[in-house]
Image (tube, coloured by chain):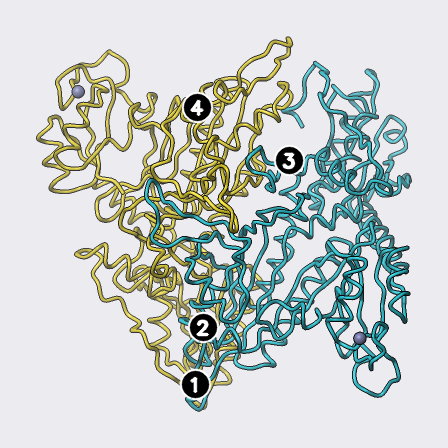
Chain colours: A yellow, B cyan
Amino acid sequence: MSEHESADSGDDDQELGITKSKEYETGEWYAEVVKKAGLANYAPEGMSGFIITRPRGYALWERLQGFLDAKFKDTGVQNAYFPLFIPESYLEAEKDIVEGFDPEVAWVTHGGHDELEERLAVRPTSESIITPYISQWVRSHRDLPLRVNQWCSVVRWEATETKPFFRTKEFLWQEGHTAHADRDGAWDETMTRLDQYESVYEDFLAIPVLRGQKPDHDKFPGADTTTTVEALMPDGKSVQGGTSHYLGTSFAEAFDITYSDEDEAERHAHTTSWGLSWRALGALIMTHSDDQGLVLPPTVAPTQVAIVPIWQEDTKDEVLGYAEGVAEELEEAGIRVELDDRDTRNPGFKFNEHELNGIPVRFEIGPYEVEDDEVTVVHRPDGEQSTVDREGIAETTREHLDEVYAKLYAAAEENLEGEVREADSRDEILGTIGQHGGYVKAPWCGDEECEDEIKDQIAAEIVMVPFEEDDDRHGTDHDDTCAVCDDDATRTAYFAKSY
Amino acid sequence: MSEHESADSGDDDQELGITKSKEYETGEWYAEVVKKAGLANYAPEGMSGFIITRPRGYALWERLQGFLDAKFKDTGVQNAYFPLFIPESYLEAEKDIVEGFDPEVAWVTHGGHDELEERLAVRPTSESIITPYISQWVRSHRDLPLRVNQWCSVVRWEATETKPFFRTKEFLWQEGHTAHADRDGAWDETMTRLDQYESVYEDFLAIPVLRGQKPDHDKFPGADTTTTVEALMPDGKSVQGGTSHYLGTSFAEAFDITYSDEDEAERHAHTTSWGLSWRALGALIMTHSDDQGLVLPPTVAPTQVAIVPIWQEDTKDEVLGYAEGVAEELEEAGIRVELDDRDTRNPGFKFNEHELNGIPVRFEIGPYEVEDDEVTVVHRPDGEQSTVDREGIAETTREHLDEVYAKLYAAAEENLEGEVREADSRDEILGTIGQHGGYVKAPWCGDEECEDEIKDQIAAEIVMVPFEEDDDRHGTDHDDTCAVCDDDATRTAYFAKSY
Ligand SMILES: [Zn+2]
Ligand SMILES: [Zn+2]
């Protein structure tokens, strides 16, 4: 902090506190937290739909990247980088199998002063350029499985209201693309990535998720199966947290990905693709934060512990010395700690600022703590306060960080469990979602029309269907009928409004 | 390697070896190494000037990023992310102080089916969007220094011949932008980043560099001083390895970056910017590689040691078991090791492949090594072979990796030292560069016209002028005259052809 020290106390132009209520004005509250915690700014005029990701926001993405990328590398994924642009004819080629993204593509038409012969799309997703190269690189079964991933930004020109990290024209994500010899290999891959996405939410962001697949009519175009993890937001809407697609052989057929098997026969590969975007940060901010500002689990927090020394002139040296010793010990133990020794700010101001910025644990150290060889520990999510021994502080801190994580997870889990309700009729689905939001589980025949009846009335849709093995309605040996049409129910559907 | 094991030996479509000569066909040789070592492919038709960065190439960038980003973070830099696009009016605003990039900008004119009201440039560099935000974020001297960096790709629509990592329309880089209270702070920052760039080359890529500043007429537009590190390539041309600009107050004045100082007076900040691109990878590949393929220093190599077990049917188990033990021990010590236990390839094929791919050290382990408790170690750059004890193998390996680094650095240093020549006249400059390439040091008056006389004749320019404190021609108390015009020489100029 030394660079910010000074004798002058100055005023901040902006008010520090959050003024909106999470419960009653969720949208405005979210925007205020993003701005005041310094996560992002809106882009300037002429750039509506774009955001500026400030260091405190980008640090969250970097930490998420670190967590997920390590898992990718442990499971055979290699990173690569493909061009930002895709020729229009490439997107057209993909149209044979998928509908394409062109209503929402940004087009480059000029390079310097010259008009291009062929328009270039700013990538809305990269399969149409990655898949042809996978096709070149795969010759024999010895080249399989082949896995490439890229971390990049993509652009989709949607004309919806901007919501930082949830809805922006440009967003950061990763997209992985793999080829395998057979269905089993590709299906295992699809599940490995879904498991890793689940782990991002449950083990890193402290957000429990539901896992399953999308209804057939809502799959990724061209996919055999689209799998998803879904997270419930405090406003009762579901966020699609990451998707992993088993593409069957459709992309391999369209782009000619073949390999010679052990008997020298030519076969089509089975492919997958999977992506997770910075929407995960939106879910993170939305789930845990409160009317005091940002709340972060210690896993993702750039600073895990803020130490606030509290001194009078005559106790300053001993208090600061003691606090510095604590900070060093935590730092050596690999804990991300910040000693806030600014003497231009009083402790109350610092408490508020660290709360606004979501630092998970605060240490307060004054003359009493020094005298008793102790540290006062405060948890950000609930303000719980305790006094702990100075000795073994690094180990104790770890326990407190784990406790904070557990508290956040438990609160999110309790919310989720209370927000999954059952319904047996069309009216009950509509009434339950209308009144409570959240998820409504209902027996479903599998027809899109039955979803449409709900969607038309209340803008809720089937966000997820549990996997066959998790769904005791799968198969025929049960008596349930579809909540909407009364035909035989073959699956359980989770209806919800969604982001 | 287990996923590549199989009973079948198949043929590769492509020839494994390098066919061009580094000495006589440097350009073709470079292109062949990039392709055959699997670093990059050219992009498809309609996308000339773009490349596909394959995993083995991208891994080099990831490692460089890790090295440099850690240095940035240790010295107060925070990463952020700004939009991919910049409104045309923003680039126009920058024109007041700089010439601008628009002859080489890619323009987005349409979003979906609609023409945009204002064209958007795909960022050729981001100061015109970053600087206005720095202006917003800086209020008081307590906000300074402010440092943001972004790792991203930029696009410059230059119609030159493509050379992977050296000349591509899209390239990966980092750009840092900082604001400081005064000249000293900003100048220190400029030097800190130049030191870090020097360290990337000298401590990580095993390439010695020359450091200095660009002539005034060749500065970054709007800069007070442009500093550079220059690396000599084997074809005798200089590569600008990274630049760090002290911008004075010109950008602060144009974009209104002011702060209130300790006496509440409003002052303009002093700013800097600095960037390093994947051209560093081009220099890496070009400098060390040879007619057998890629050569990498162990620092940047994704795999540092390849272990090739050599067995007959009756010795297979013991040889493989021994090799696995060695691999495990290296891995536990944090050495990046690959055990090449494919039984579809003979050892000679494996040797060639690992040489082509630039793995710095090879271990050969056969029955004799097992019997004698030894390992045969081969250095990639010069084929030096030795036999070492199995005991303490991790420590021994580190020593060998350090030796390989030292060999590469020494070779590059020897080349550089032999390629700096002196000249005292226009004809001597022309003759020396014409005959030898490399750098020619000459006394210079400081006039652009004197550089033009050289440039017009032989396409060599002043790539670097040593800093004043390193240049005994600086000042007036010496008798040298400019090699070109015979006016007083005030500086030493390094002439060279450049990339
Ligand atoms: Zn139905
Ligand atoms: Zn002259």
How far apart in space, not on screen, are marks 4 and 3 (Cα)?
Answer: 25 Å
User: Does the residue tagged 3 have its C-beta within 8 Å of any atom of ligand 2?
Assistant: no
Mark positioned earlier in the residue sequence (2 or 3): 3
Mark positioned earlier in the residue sequence (2 or 1): 2
Q: Give coordinates of residue B74: x percent, y percent.
A: 59, 65
- In this orientation, which residue lies closer to the viewer: B464 or B83? B464
Q: Amino acid at mark 4?
A: Leu
Q: Amino acid at mark 2?
A: Phe
How far apart in space, not on screen, are marks 2 and 1 (Cα)?
Answer: 15 Å
Instruction: Look at the image and tell me in which quarter the N terminus of chain B lies.
Output: top right
- In this orientation, which residue lies closer to the viewer: A429 or B186? B186
Q: Chain of mark 2?
A: B
Labels 2 and 1 in the same subunit: yes
The dot on residue A322 is: none
Could you say whether the residue bearing mark 1 is in a helix, strand or loop?
strand
**Label 4–label 3 contact, CB within 8 A:** no
Label 2 CA crowd tier, 10 Å (few <14, some 14–19, many 20+) = some
Labels 4 and 3 in the same subunit: no
- Please determine whether, in this image, residue A209 is positioned above or below residue B407: above
Q: Amino acid at mark 1?
A: Glu
Q: Amino acid at mark 3?
A: Asn
- Please determine whether, in this image, residue B297 is positioned above or below residue A117: below
Could you say whether the residue bearing mark 2 is in a helix, strand or loop?
helix
Residue matched to label 2: B255
Quadrant position of residue A43 = bottom left
Q: Nearer the viewer, mark 4 or mark 1?
A: 1
Residue matched to label 3: B41
